[in-house]
């Protein structure tokens, strides 16, 4: 059977499974809708958290980024895992004991203020909307490449599926579909990596294969990383494993981005909210462990995929005549995600550092002398002739490794699982922020269960439509807004939640001033450097890492203002004492 | 607030402090600040600094959370503040 048929089978089977699970776990009450009735077992919550967390970016893009960045790709690998240690030690158990529905709930109650609640809920919505647009886009790309439909048709199918199970089952439906989606995505990712590892090194466990010796080719007998470094040196590039090489990221950038991503992770509402769904404080702690273990399976495999792909790409393409290029190369050239310009005019593909031309390929629709698809972009003056979109590294890896067609289909289903599971987790945050925090807690505290459920479902529908719109018409700055999401999460929620738990005296005035100071600084800096073309003026810190500074500003302002203003009322100090011990955690309540 | 509660909380804070110190040492210390000198040592097919940055630190993160869970569950029982 062909790749296309296999992909249809895999995608239809997996979607059927999600819809079946959603139907089985439909809910009628707000508690089921927002926090799955606080009855999710820790192991399942760990899987759901992992699927929630690992987005289209983790599954599709990250290994590709690392493959092109080498050592510097570490910022994503450590940054998107290290935050779970902060979450497990500093946030999850206490927030579970607090026992409400959302992050703005905690901020509003702990700081006894509707203003704080509204600031928190605006941040939660902004962060989640930013994120969800990227997921819909990711789903659309997988559809268009593997199922040969238009990107926009793909986005609409993705929207329909997510809406179905999010509106029907709320958090409960989402949780159980995420468990299934985790299984699909991890099996796909690891099987593909294992097959490539086995092919190159004879060792099927990719984490070990990455440290083994090559069994074929010119460099047989060398360690994989030794071979990659050697190839790079032969081409006159910096070594793959080399840190802080000239022209790459410096130490300050690596530190600040890693820290901003870690702290941002721990401050993301769709991650925190998952710890409200487990039955106890003990379960919250251990489910953070399961979550990171399940995430680590992918995150320790991704750098191996990156390395193997780097080796494969250079080994099979560089200095090869275009007419003899492997078939995956020509398949992906059809999609415009791979392009070659014959700068030297000799029909041989040269793969060096830098971009071969300016901007993404602009296909003219004509073929060149050797049969390559021509582009009309302005050429750069380096001697690199090859354009490879970073997003295809994972999706093309089964083809690069000559794996069977069904595995290509499985990887496509895995990419969709990653995109849809994250999208659904974000939608429930948006829906709960508006229907619970805004509508029920502020606008209409007398609302009945029925009204609250109806508003929740309507909000999911609206959020799906907005996300779908941005998926079909992506704003030109999708990559930039990711810096926004993490920067805002780091500079808004993280410090004031921590201070709210670990001090009793930090007060309303401090928290509001701190959040506003942290967010304003971070937003201003990102807008100045990303959109207005200013140089990174704060000690040269790149905008992706500025959340670290925003977080410190938030904490400093919160502490200073709190120490000069009236300390919180007695019942708040009692609340803080209460969240510090597990006993009496009970179930989450909305009242 | 009882004495035993204060003791419980202090032990919790100490544990968090120790685990976060290890967390920072492995990720920022070995994986970033010391990556260049450590990369001169190749162990089991990896330059050591690169291995800590892209593999080792993640394993350590997982272990840290597990250790925290085990010790805190015991602490909860010892100070009689666990969920029943």
Image (spheres, rainbow, N blue to C red):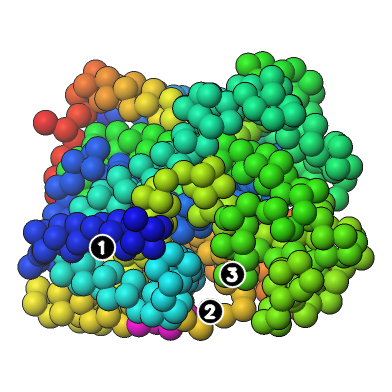
Q: Is residue A489 left or right of residue A456?
A: right
Q: Whole-Å distance between the Cαs marked 1 and 2? A: 26 Å
Tags 1 and 3 on a common chain = yes
Mark 2 nearby-residue class (10 Å; few <14, some 14–19, many ≥20):
some
First to last magenta residue range = A465-470
Q: Quadrant of residue A529?
A: bottom right
Residue drawn at x 57%, y 36% as measured from the top left? A304
Let me know if residue A86 appears in the view. no
Q: Give the image location of residue A59, x and y in percent.
A: 47, 52
1 vs 2, front mark: 1
Report which residue position mark 3 lands on.
A334
Residue A219 covered by magenta stretch: no
Report which residue position mark 1 lands on.
A12
Mark 1 nearby-residue class (10 Å; few <14, some 14–19, many ≥20):
few
Whichever of callouts 1 and 3 sits on the residue coming sooner in the sequence is 1
Depicted B5 relative to depicted A411: above or below = above
Q: What is the magenta segment's predominant secondary structure?
A: helix
Whichever of callouts 1 and 2 sits on the residue coming sooner in the sequence is 1
Let me know if residue A527 appears in the view. yes
Q: Give the image location of residue A215, x and y in percent.
A: 62, 24
2 vs 3, front mark: 3
Residue A469 covered by magenta stretch: yes
Residue drawn at x 27%, y 80% as measured from the top left? A461
Report which residue position mark 2 lands on.
A474
| Chain containing mark 2 | A
Q: Secondary structure at mark 2?
A: loop
Mark 3 nearby-residue class (10 Å; few <14, some 14–19, many ≥20):
few
């Amino acid at each position: 059977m062909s790749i296309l048929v296999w992909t249809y089978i895999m995608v239809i089977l997996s979607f059927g499974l999600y819809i079946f699970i959603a139907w089985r776990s439909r809910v009628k009450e707000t508690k089921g809708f927002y926090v799955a009735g606080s009855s999710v077992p820790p192991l399942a919550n760990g899987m759901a958290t992992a699927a929630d967390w690992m987005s289209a970016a983790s599954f599709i893009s990250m290994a590709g980024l690392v493959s092109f960045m080498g050592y510097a790709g570490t910022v994503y690998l450590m940054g998107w895992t290290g935050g779970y240690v902060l979450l497990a030690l500093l946030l999850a158990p206490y927030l579970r004991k607090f026992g409400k529905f959302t992050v703005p709930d905690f901020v509003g109650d702990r700081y006894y203020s509707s203003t704080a609640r509204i600031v928190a809920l605006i941040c939660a919505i902004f962060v989640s909307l930013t994120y969800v647009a990227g997921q819909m886009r990711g789903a659309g790309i997988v559809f268009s490449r593997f199922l040969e439909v238009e990107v926009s048709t793909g986005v609409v199918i993705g929207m329909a599926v997510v809406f179905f199970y999010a509106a029907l089952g709320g958090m409960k439906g989402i949780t159980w579909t995420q468990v299934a989606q985790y299984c699909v995505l991890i099996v796909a990712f690891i099987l593909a990596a294992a097959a490539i590892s086995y092919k190159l090194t004879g060792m099927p466990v990719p984490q070990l294969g990455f440290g083994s010796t090559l069994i074929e080719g010119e460099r047989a007998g060398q360690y994989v990383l030794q071979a990659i470094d050697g190839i790079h040196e032969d081409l006159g590039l910096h070594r793959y494993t080399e840190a802080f090489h000239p022209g790459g990221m410096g130490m300050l950038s690596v530190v600040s981005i890693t820290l901003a991503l870690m702290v941002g992770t721990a401050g993301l509402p769709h991650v925190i909210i998952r710890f409200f769904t487990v039955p106890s404080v003990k379960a919250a702690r251990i489910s953070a462990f399961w979550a990171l273990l399940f995430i680590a399976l992918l995150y320790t495999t991704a750098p191996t995929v990156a390395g193997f792909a780097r080796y494969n790409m250079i080994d099979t393409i560089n200095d090869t005549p275009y007419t003899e290029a492997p078939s995956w190369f020509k398949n992906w050239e059809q999609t415009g995600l791979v392009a070659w310009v014959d700068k030297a005019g000799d029909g041989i593909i040269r793969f060096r550092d830098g971009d071969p031309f300016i901007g993404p390929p602009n296909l003219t629709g004509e073929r060149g002398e050797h049969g390559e698809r021509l582009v009309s972009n302005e050429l750069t003056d380096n001697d690199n002739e090859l354009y490879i979109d970073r997003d295809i590294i994972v999706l093309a890896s089964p083809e690069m490794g000559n794996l069977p067609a069904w595995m290509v289909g499985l990887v496509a289903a895995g990419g969709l699982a990653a995109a849809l599971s994250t999208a659904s987790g974000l939608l429930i945050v948006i829906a709960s922020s508006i229907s619970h925090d805004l509508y029920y807690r502020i606008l209409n505290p007398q609302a009945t269960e029925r009204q609250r459920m109806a508003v929740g479902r309507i909000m999911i529908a609206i959020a799906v439509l907005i996300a779908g719109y941005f998926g079909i018409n992506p704003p030109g700055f999708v990559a930039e807004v990711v810096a926004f999401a993490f920067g805002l999460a780091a500079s808004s929620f993280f410090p004031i939640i921590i201070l709210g738990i670990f001090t009793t005296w930090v007060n309303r005035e401090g928290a509001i001033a701190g959040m506003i100071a942290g967010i304003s600084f971070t937003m201003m800096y990102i807008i100045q450097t990303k959109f207005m073309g200013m140089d990174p003026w704060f000690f040269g810190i790149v905008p992706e890492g500025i959340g670290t500074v925003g977080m410190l500003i938030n904490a400093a302002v919160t502490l200073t203002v709190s120490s000069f203003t009236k300390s919180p009322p007695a019942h708040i100090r009692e609340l803080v004492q209460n969240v510090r011990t597990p006993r009496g955690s009970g179930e989450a309540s909305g009242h | 607030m009882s004495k035993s509660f204060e003791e419980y909380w202090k032990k919790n804070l100490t544990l968090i402090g120790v685990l976060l110190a290890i967390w920072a040492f492995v990720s920022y210390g070995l994986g970033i600040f010391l990556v260049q000198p450590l990369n001169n040592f190749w162990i089991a097919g990896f330059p050591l600094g690169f291995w800590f940055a892209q593999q080792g630190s993640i394993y350590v993160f997982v272990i840290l959370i597990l250790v925290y869970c085990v010790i805190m569950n015991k602490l909860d029982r010892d100070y009689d503040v666990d969920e029943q």
